[in-house]
Amino acid sequence: MPLRELVIDGFKSFAEKTTIHFNTGITGIVGPNGSGKSNITEAIRWVMGESSAKSLRGSNMKDVIFAGSEFRKPANRAEVTMIFDNKKHELSCDSDQVAISRQILRSGDSEYLINKQTVRLRDVRALFLDSGISQNSLAIISQGRVDQILNSRPEDRRSLFEEAAGVLHFKKQKEAAEGQLDKTNDNLVRINDLVKELE
Ligand code: ATP
């Protein structure tokens, strides 16, 4: 499902609401050092659920809010929205267009939205799980990430392949079902004990 628009408002160096349009084919973003190119990929990772402030080059998640400049006062909130064309329904959502947003206020309050409805982070993660574009997937390769992947443990590298192949979703469902099965077996053992006591 093609990413059509990225709307960044009050996030890092993007003091003003900025919309980046992605047309078919390759979109290149160029600019001088420090102009905010990496902030764009960080905005994408953030809206997809990045929870580590450190990996966004900050010490606290509130650091993503525009901190002010010589001519501008700091922003009170940051908001990023990714808008996908979902006509082929590759994202498990009924609508033909899916807008995923994340907001954070100076107070630290934050929320996720899918098509303007408040959702939980796990809903956003579930939406992306089969798409191969989750925040940690190879769809986003930032500076230093290639070395990190090459030096990672084989099991960590395997999970990247599993995600790309779309099996991670089923693996997670299998783990949940196995947990449920264990609980049911424990209950059965307990019931059998009770039956024996009563006999
Ligand atoms: P390079 O080509 O050197 O990698 P870049 O174009 O990728 O640079 P970024 O690293 O995305 O640039 O942007 C860095 C800029 O973002 C710095 O000028 C920094 O001051 C600014 N910046 C980061 N966080 C904030 C914030 N919370 N508020 C305001 N500006 C910020």
Image (tube, grey):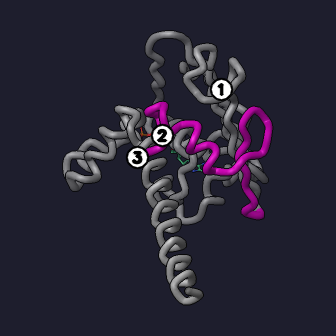
Disc 3 marks which residue?
171
> Residue 100 has which mark?
none
Find the distance from the CA under tag 3 to the CA under tag 1: 28 Å
Highlighted magenta segment, given as a residue range: 107-136
Q: Position of residue 125 (x, y in %)?
A: 56, 44
What's the amino acid at mark 1? Ile
Q: Position of residue 199 (x, y in %)?
A: 55, 86
> Residue 83 has which mark?
1
Identify the residue at image location x=67%, y=54%. Answer: 67
Q: Residues within 10 Å of mark 2 (few under 14, many from 20)?
A: many
Find the distance from the CA under tag 1 to the CA under tag 2: 15 Å
Disc 2 marks which residue?
134
Q: Earlier in the sequence, mark 3 or mark 1?
A: 1
Q: Position of residue 148 (x, y in %)?
A: 27, 50
1 or 2: mark nearer the eye: 2
Q: Could one spot residue 17 in this view of the protein?
A: yes
What's the amino acid at mark 3? Lys
Q: Could one spot residue 15 in this view of the protein?
A: no
Find the distance from the CA under tag 2 to the CA under tag 3: 16 Å
Cβ of mark 2 under 8 A from ligand 1: no
For this orientation, the residue located farthest to the bottom is: 197
Q: Earlier in the sequence, mark 2 or mark 3?
A: 2
Is 116 displayed left or right of 23 in the figure?
A: right
Identify the residue at image location x=58%, y=27%. Answer: 91
Q: Earlier in the sequence, mark 1 or mark 2?
A: 1
Q: Secondary structure at mark 3?
A: helix
Identify the residue at image location x=40%, y=34%. Answer: 166
Q: Are marks 1 and 2 in contact (CB under 8 Å)?
A: no
Relative to the observer, which residue lies in front, 149 or 190? Answer: 190
Q: Is residue 172 magenta?
A: no
Is 104 displayed left or right of 128 in the figure?
A: right
Quarter that holds the N terminus: top right
